[in-house]
Amino acid sequence: PSPLQHYWSLAVEEQFYVVWPALVAFICIGIGTQSRTALRIRIGAVSALASVASFIACMNLMESSQPWAFFSPHTRAFELSLGALFAVLPIAQGKAVRTLSSLVAWCGLVGVIGSVLLFTDSTKFPGPWAIVPVLATAVLLYGGEATSWSPRLLLSVPPLQWLGSRSYSAYLWHWPVLIVAAAAMERELSVVDGLVCLGISLALSELSYRIVENPIRLNKSIRGVKALVLAVSLISIVGGSAVLARNNPPTMTGGVAATAPTILNTTTTIDPLVSTTSVVPTAPELPAPSAPIDAIVQAMSATGLPGNITPTLQGALSDMPTIYNNGCHGSFSTKQPKKCEFGDLASTTVIGLYGDSHAAQWFPAFEKVAIKRHWKLITYTKRGCPPAEIPTYSKVLGKVYNECAPWRANVLKQMVTDGVQVVFVAHFDRLLSASTRIPMWQKEWRTALQGTLDALTSQNITPVLIEDTPYPGQDVPTCLSRHYTNVQLCSPRISSAFRPDMTQMLHDFDDAGVHVLWARQWFCTEVGCPAVVGNILVYRDDNHMTVSYASFIAPLLDEAIFPVVDWYTHTPK
């Protein structure tokens, strides 16, 4: 995870601070300066409405995309607007009301502490449970000073006052300290490690509080009108830059239209690592690693970005397989695979595509082959879930990805029900370990994949492992927008595009009789992997190929897999 990932909450907060004052000013129109009650009622009503709308949006989005529900300002706005609602509530008056307010405030304190102690990685958040710490904090603030025995009695002690004054600094420091520590130790942090990190975070918080925060906050020269001018200027610069970046993407001047690539075998020679075994002695083998196709060789000598690049750099991120839009590619919360069939739905030849987004990226190519060969293609893909039976850590969710195990179990049952005969298995080989939060070692992958292969073959389903696509290591469209006169700066070298240990693992599986689809010759030469082939953009982001490129290599996929699929589905065993 990024050591600055926690800044998202500051972004949400600042967006609220920009929008909310303008909204309050708007709803104040028509109210005289003496009508404070009317103003409170309007602000309270809008705050309540905004809180309910935001919370409902959060609940709905949790079902389809938990990360968006977590990071989106629209789905987290209720946590701030609820505070605005409590801010305009009348102050508790009368002994009975003040006593009740204090009791509720103590309940709020219990709710805050309970949330810290009881919420775990398995707690669906921000989901319905998010209302607990938010509402608890709101009632704590509202009634915390209602009586002499209110929570203020506890919260006003000097150590907690010290911590409260440095809480902002502590928030900024705690996450980078944890991430750096985990990366340095290459293992999951223990309780002792966590306490040490806490101490370091508090020490850094004290330093930044004294050296940075207070000197700026208490500086008289930037108060009043100067502070207002500075704030407005910064907001204008940031907002204006965002609008310009969104509405005026970089244009590629001088780009020459490139010819669409064609698929031809090259005369370039490399020494392939030859496979000599197969699952059944008489079954045909998939092609061994071989020389790259001509289009790849030619692309490695290209310089400028084509003016007719497909898809465009601006549209690259949306150049995704259709299974992303029709609900077939499972979301983070999906546990039951959706039955999605393509190709010839009446065919008795049934193949499957199984894995995470690195399996889903192959869908356009497999669909073309299925249509051509009159096969039925069924997809079993889910975001971030490898087919290997191993827990992973999701840096998007910020937790161990527990939803994969039940999904995998249900996929196997569904494959049996669907009558899948051959399944193509793919995954992103740089997923993070649940324990260390760094890319999993080959040994972990090997053991986990073996379990998956055994489970499939025990159900008479023939698995085919697909070599992972090259890893660019950077967002390719962004890189090309900066280096459009030299696209090779965005083309990964072969030494970094593939993990040698994972390549060796696939060779070991191949030698043990497992079918492996070697695909690197469709992406790379022996030197590197071009970011642009002809006029086709290869990558839509930092690790997925575009639909355009998947469609381009479909004939190669067809040539490679047809003999194997045909043998397993039509030859009497």
Image: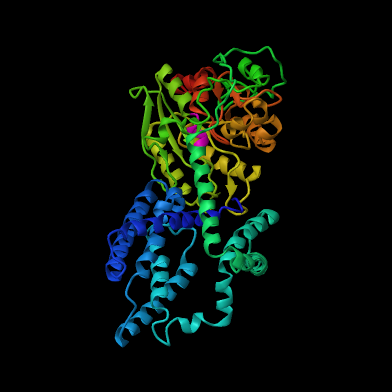
- Looking at this view, is 367 or 486 the one in front? 486
Total marks shown come to 0
- Looking at this view, is 264 or 572 the one in front? 264
Q: Is residue 368 above or below residue 380?
A: above
Q: Is residue 101 above or below residue 537?
A: below
Which residue appears at 61% of the width and 25% of the height?
523
> Image check: 53 left or right of 73?
left
> Image check: 55 left or right of 164?
left
Which residue appears at 58% of the width and 79% of the height?
159
Residue 117 can be seen in this image: yes
Q: Is residue 253 above or below residue 116?
A: above
Q: Position of residue 126 (x, y in %)?
A: 42, 57
Q: Position of residue 387 (x, y in %)?
A: 51, 40
Here the colouring is rainbow
Q: Quadrant of residue 219?
A: bottom right
Q: Position of residue 98 (x, y in %)?
A: 34, 83
> Which residue is at the far front?
225
Residue range corresponding to the magenta coloring? 357-362
In terms of secondary structure, what is the magenta stretch mainly?
helix
Q: Position of residue 311 (x, y in %)?
A: 50, 25
> Image check: 517 left or right of 109?
right
Residue 400 can be seen in this image: no
- Looking at this view, is 220 or 425 the one in front? 220
Q: Is residue 469 above or below residue 242?
A: above
- Looking at this view, is 558 or 109 the one in front? 109
Residue 542 on the magenta segment: no
